[in-house]
Amino acid sequence: MKRHLILFWLLTACLPACAHEVHHAVAAQSAVSVRLTFADGQPFAFEAFEVYAAGSDKPHAVGRTDADGRAVFLPPPSGEVRLRAFAADGHGVDLKFDPPRSGEAVAAGATEDRGAKLFFGAGLLLAIFGIVQLFLQRKKT
């Protein structure tokens, strides 16, 4: 009787070990890779990112960029995605785009916007300078 109890106890003690198994499956799928860099060209490396499917508040994927600043993820089956990447120092990006399907490439939008942003910034500085000069001229008279 004592042996049966010990054997029963040993068998039931081993059952929770099955709950700690991790199964895996390897599959080849098309992933999206978004390379992020700072303005000086340095990679946005090892920073957190989140990917959201269109209209969802729950992240579709989360992770960290690699040493080259790449955020790699499997896109949702269809629709636009939102990629948010952020660093502890406050730098970050919030992008919305349609991910490429089956090997097509997408041009980076940041380089297209850079000239417009620089032009806008220079115009804003000139406008502020003009307002300050106008105010100083009025004070003199």
Image: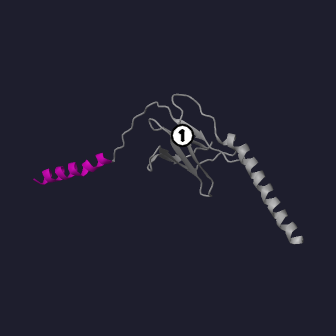
Which of the 4 image quadrants contains residue 22? Answer: top left
Q: Main secondary structure of the magenta part?
A: helix
Q: Is residue 56 left or right of residue 109?
A: left
Label 1 secondary element: strand
Residue 72 is covered by the magenta coloring: no
Residue pictured at 64% horizontal, 40% vertical: 109
Q: Is residue 69 left or right of residue 138?
A: left
In the image, taking residue 29 as reference, residue 69 lies left or right, namely: right
Question: Is residue 17 highlighted in magenta?
Answer: yes
Q: Nearer the viewer, residue 85 or 135?
A: 135
Residue range in magenta is 1-19
Residue 45: x and y, percent? Answer: 62, 47
The answer to whether 38 is drawn above or below residue 75 in the figure is below
Residue nearer the viewer, 100 or 19: 100
Q: Nearer the viewer, residue 130 or 4?
A: 130
| Residue 117 location (% of width, % of height) | 71, 47
Disc tally is 1
Residue underneath mark 1: 72
User: In this picture, is 134 found above or below 49?
Assistant: below
**Hey, which quadrant is residue 140 in on the image?**
bottom right
In the picture, the quarter occupied by the C terminus is: bottom right
Please name the residue shown 63% across and 35% down the image: 107
Label 1 Cα crowd, 10 Å radius (few <14 / some 14-19 / many 20+): some
Please identify the quarter of the rendering in which residue 76 is found: top left
Q: Residue furthest left?
A: 1
Residue 108 in percent (x, y) is at 64, 38
Q: Residue at x 45, y 50 (%)?
A: 57
> What's the image's color scheme?
one colour
Which residue type does callout 1 highlight? Val
The x and y percentages for residue 23 are 36, 40
